[in-house]
Amino acid sequence: MLKRYFPILEWSVKYDRDTLTNDLVAAVIVTIMLIPQSLAYALLAGLPAEVGLYASIAPLVIYAIFGTSRALAVGPVAVASLMTAAAVGELASQGTPEYYAAAIALALISGLMLLVMGFLRLGFLANFLSHPVISGFITASAIIIATSQLKHIFGIDASGHNILELVVSITAHLSEINYYTLSIGVFATAFLFWVRGNLKPLLRKLGLGPRLAEVVAKTGPVAAVAATTAVVWAMALDAKGVRIIGEIPARLPVPTVPTFDLNLWSAIAVPALLISIVGYVETISVAQTLAAKRRQRIDPDQELIALGAANVGSAVSGGFPVTGGFSRSVVNFDAGAQTPAAGAFTAVGIAMAALFLTPLLHFLPKATLAATIIVAVLSLIDLDSIKRTWAYSKSDFAAMMATILTTLVFGVEMGITAGVGLSLFLHLYRSSRPHSAIVGQVPGTEHFRNVRRHEVIVTPEILSIRIDESLYFANARFLEDLINDAVAEDPAIEHVVLMCSAVNFIDASALESLEAINERLQHADVMLHLSEVKGPVMDRLKHSHFLDDLTGRIYLTQYDAVHTINPHVANRASEMSRVE
Amino acid sequence: MLKRYFPILEWSVKYDRDTLTNDLVAAVIVTIMLIPQSLAYALLAGLPAEVGLYASIAPLVIYAIFGTSRALAVGPVAVASLMTAAAVGELASQGTPEYYAAAIALALISGLMLLVMGFLRLGFLANFLSHPVISGFITASAIIIATSQLKHIFGIDASGHNILELVVSITAHLSEINYYTLSIGVFATAFLFWVRGNLKPLLRKLGLGPRLAEVVAKTGPVAAVAATTAVVWAMALDAKGVRIIGEIPARLPVPTVPTFDLNLWSAIAVPALLISIVGYVETISVAQTLAAKRRQRIDPDQELIALGAANVGSAVSGGFPVTGGFSRSVVNFDAGAQTPAAGAFTAVGIAMAALFLTPLLHFLPKATLAATIIVAVLSLIDLDSIKRTWAYSKSDFAAMMATILTTLVFGVEMGITAGVGLSLFLHLYRSSRPHSAIVGQVPGTEHFRNVRRHEVIVTPEILSIRIDESLYFANARFLEDLINDAVAEDPAIEHVVLMCSAVNFIDASALESLEAINERLQHADVMLHLSEVKGPVMDRLKHSHFLDDLTGRIYLTQYDAVHTINPHVANRASEMSRVE
């Protein structure tokens, strides 16, 4: 029991020197990668840069205690930062203490929601986000994020939470471009793109081992940060309008008491829920992918608790919402992290950076961080997934495009809500009109197949219908219509046999529909029979009056049904097969 | 095409003298029943009594033109009237012109929504209301309606849209009881209950034919109206505090221009949608029940258009929302109505009443109308359905009780919304954790069954899993967890075979999950195979990369799969069967 809620008890007892070495190496690499990322994502969320460092200390230690994934690296990520900016931007203006307080409250509520969901084992809620919706949402978010960073590259003021606002705002301020800033921004972006694509192969050619090449390639952002900071400092470009990070207090995060303001809490409840669920879905898919590679298990409900605790930890140490990051988790895994202790060591690294590195970051230009963000998020744009979804399923494609367009035009909250709503709607629509077939006997066999696809024997007085879906409220009326219409069309019908081989479940609505069908058929002098009813469905039906009221019988097989109702059919069938 | 949208063109050409006679007789009986009902329901909706008559003229004629049901009688009904009172009561106080205008606008918008749904063929939207939710909602509404009418029986002032408000308000005013009113109310209620239960058998004993006895028994409310009106008039009880209907203008409804006020429209959009859907569901189930008795068809989408047009007609003639009434439709049917013309004739009857009968209704006590409503709605309380649902399905029961309690405590709109929400949630929850089984070969056969229920042969290196549900976003992650955990638990596994005999559909989310499973298994050196994939599912899969990436193969049957992967299994199985 204790081990379920504290997975650390499981792995810490087997912790040895080898594991320590592996974890330490991974921690160093992730720390180097995380410093510029955490500063950049804090800026993206509209917060002071150091808040990104604060959100990368306590949450990592807490996740190490509660998390079940061995390699997941939590911290600030791009999409959650954008969602934070959108949610908090509604309530306060950037740079005010209220804005920062709201961001902390967002992390707290989001964390508490995840904790509650974890204790209630509500991890399945994440299933409501279908893959195309998530993928579309991330693509659209990445486009918004990249666009929003252009202002830092151009060195202008601009704002907006959707693509239209951003483009209008950027266009309006284009005349104010600062060309020093633009030079730094373009250089940093180009350099980072080059690093991403070309540095590793180059290092390999120069004779470095694959793992070392990988590690060195990951230091690209740090190099860009160091180089551009040095240039700004050396040339005093800040005096020429290049915006820099400025004064960062060189200290560890201090315990923060989040605001307990009911108005604030209710205003951010919905965004907090959306951030929780989106963050959780991302976390789980990363964790599961990495766990499977080493044939390890993760516990999705415990992950809710771990992520929730990490967010509460972020809130009480002055941070903002965190989740499991994809690229840094992969780096952590590839660098050899064996246990969540690697995350705790990373936290130590970030804490050291907060204490000793911050004075060096004074002259860091915001344009460099914007370049880091742009290069990182452009890899999130998944056009291939759009193409694949179009090829595979038009309705999933519709949900995806609705998510992308709504997110771009109306912002992240509307976007994700529209996507989830449309997915549910399309699913219910689909199962409300299930596939069904009028079936007949395949000559010479006991099989019954669709009359439209096969040459089969039908008897005019028996209507055999097969439904390829569980019967529940969304398709109960469909069934009524189907049988009503079929019987009304053909006065010869005296028996209806419902073939239930694909019915896994009959809910109370469908049961009432069956009762209504039975009663209506009775008034029309038609008997209703069922065939091939599955065991669990039959067990349920025995708890109702349906079996007593049923005018016909329940048959083990469709063949039994037709054969018993009208023995001539079977004879005819066997004659036909003999003729053939 | 024209006939589809104007079903009148179909039946009117075959209209003959016999049909006319039948329709006229039915119309007379329904008119007698409808006069007190329409007055009473207008009062329930908080409107002047004559508005009930106006809502029973144009809508009936319009339904006769567009409706596909031969016997459906539309007009004001109890539940829609309560919903009207709840919706309009939020916006204006009873008795004001604004209140009346809002009720008219509600009918208009509700009608337009139904029309749009009809043209877009969105009749399936009504499926979102499961039977237990509808049944619970109607039961709770009936309790609220009956309670709300007690004020008229007691002759006191009281108000409230939920049971708590009503009980508190009635209790607070109990000291103001008017005993003349109470006497009339109690007498009328007792009389109507007696009529409902005992009059028809009594008339039969007195030698009346069954049909005539039925008809005479239906005149009970009219008799109560006549008797109590006469008593009030003769004893001048209105001067002693008995509230009466008072002056009703003796005229036909005049064309009304509904208010085009965007604020008003947006304020009543949600209630209008709820009234539309609840009314439509009621209409459809009545219409379908009656149609089936004579082996006729109704067109659910055309019914949307007919009901929508009827509501628009109600709005432009000064009426309020109408729907198909259950009891009056049954009376219409039993009285022999052959075509929707019976409804048009009823409209003529109500128009005559509006012109010539209204002066006689001046002294009609409101207590009598309240008694009519109470007796009518108490028959809507369906305790039996609660019991049956409890016995059959606990989750449906939960949705039902949530609907009942929310409706009672928070009112109709919250109630129906909670019910629909919970139904959807429970359905998704259920299908997000589908039934699945690890299967093995039944010795001596080619069948594969659940290892937990049957003595079967399994090979340690092959994991055979059967999923009893279509794969879609809500259960895609479940599948990932299932296979991940199973493979992580047992290092001997080298092959996973997914048996898809019950999978009717794979959406894009599930496809991505399958791809992820395939990739993760590949990293763990396990091959993934599928078996018994249905034709349409296979067609879909061919539009994706999955079949190219799949590490294993697709087998026609589970037996084929296991046999091909490891021929020893089949040998072992046949050996075992020989031993037995």
Image: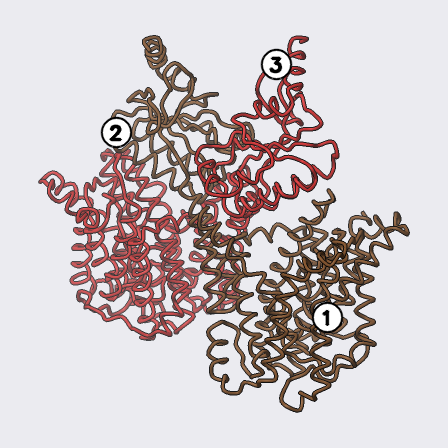
Chain colours: A brown, B red
Q: On the picture, is B77 further left or further right than B450?
A: left
Horizontal and vertical percent for residue A136?
51, 58
| Chain hosting mark 2 | A
> Which mark is nearer the camera, 3 or 1?
1
Residue at point 52%, 33% (across, down)? B502
The image quadrant of residue A194 is: bottom right
User: For mark 1, what is the residue?
Assistant: A222
- At label 1, which amino acid type do we have? Val
Packing grade of label 3 (10 A; few <14, some 14-19, many >=20) is some
Chain letter of the residue carrying label 3:
B
Q: Amino acid at mark 3?
A: Gly
Write down the residue under mark 3.
B444
**Could you tell me which secondary element the residue under label 2 belongs to?**
loop
Disc 1 and disc 2 on one polypeptide chain: yes
**Separation (CA) of disc 3 from disc 1:** 67 Å
Q: Determine the secondary structure under disc 1.
A: helix
- Place of residue B69 in the rendered image (x, y in percent of width and height, measured from the top left): 25, 44
| Mark 1 crowd level (few <14, some 14–19, many ≥20, 10 Å Cα) | some
How far apart marks 2 and 3 lie (CA) works out to: 45 Å
Q: Choose between B148 and B280: the one closer to the eye.
A: B280
Q: Indicate the quadrant where residue B311 lies.
A: bottom left
Residue matched to label 2? A490
Q: Amino acid at mark 2?
A: Asp
Label 1–label 2 contact, CB within 8 A? no
